[in-house]
Amino acid sequence: MSTKRMIPLRVAVLASGRGSNLQAVIDAIEAGQVHATIAAVISNKKDAVALERARKHGLKDLFVDPKPFAGRPDSREAYDRALLEVLEQHNVELVLLAGYMKIVTAVLVNAYANRMMNIHPSLLPSFPGLEVQKKALDWGCKLAGCTVHFVTEGVDEGPIILQAAVPILDGDTPESLASRILGQEHKIYPRAVQLFAEGRLRVDGRRVLIDGGKPDGEAIISPS
Ligand code: GAR
């Protein structure tokens, strides 16, 4: 059941790199397409371009250094406890992983069960992990794409919220394919955030049901 919120959804974005997905979410919020506010952009990399983007838009940017936690047997959990503290301080309701190149542990996953999303540049469950555009090309796939999913402990395994498919063309390189996929990432991530903000997502086992979703859909065939 969807619920109309008066107050914008409080979102945190975790990013390690260039932050183009962060930018897409910022732009959608600024354009009034997503009813949310970014309470903090957090990175495990001091020089992440994502942090610069946050500063440019007057958003809170936070570098949480993993080094003090390194070497201990529970280093990943300890780091996530530090992150959790920051998220709670900022009253974060939804966490977005956007090019966050660190595996999150049960500490965060449990605290934000069904309230943490990730974007991945493949049509999951095909090609979890890294260098996935190359893997799709090498496999000879005709369609590739991207997936927004809720985060569970298994890497790239959580319930799927939205996916977008793109054709793989004969002349594609991993780079050209990545760029075509990225264009779709920038569309579906903000859309998933808005669906969450509208209270329209319901997790039923592995399936995410979308309140008011379209009753039918057309086939995507490639080559068309
Ligand atoms: C995006 O393509 C995202 O899907 C991918 O990293 C890129 C980050 O780009 N994430 C993963 O591969 C996670 N498994 P961005 O920093 O420009 O948003």
Image: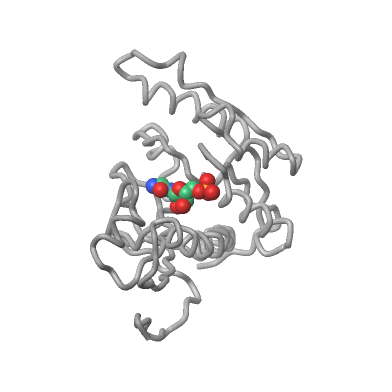
On the question of residue 117 being in view, the answer is no
Residue reaching furthest front?
Answer: 171
Query: In this rendering, is residue 123 above or below 64?
Result: below
- Rendered image quadrant of residue 49: top right
Query: In this rendering, is residue 11 above or below 83?
Result: below
Identify the residue at image location x=37%, y=25%.
Answer: 77
- Rendered image quadrant of residue 222: bottom left
Choose between 167 and 83: the one closer to the eye: 167
Q: How many marks?
A: 0
Horizontal and vertical percent position of residue 174: 39, 57
Residue reaching furthest left?
Answer: 139
Choose between 10 and 34: the one closer to the eye: 34
Choose between 49 and 177: the one closer to the eye: 177
Horizontal and vertical percent position of residue 192: 52, 61
Identify the residue at image location x=60%, y=40%.
Answer: 50
Identify the residue at image location x=42%, y=38%.
Answer: 101
Horizontal and vertical percent position of residue 115: 47, 48
- Rendered image quadrant of residue 86: top right
Horizontal and vertical percent position of residue 206: 29, 60
Q: Name the side, left or right, on which 9 lies relative to 140.
A: right
On the question of residue 29 being in view, the answer is yes
Quadrant where the C terminus lies? bottom left
Say how the picture is coloured: one colour
Q: Name the side, left or right, on which 9 lies relative to 71.
A: right
Choose between 216 and 15: the one closer to the eye: 15
Q: Name the side, left or right, on which 60 lies relative to 143.
A: right
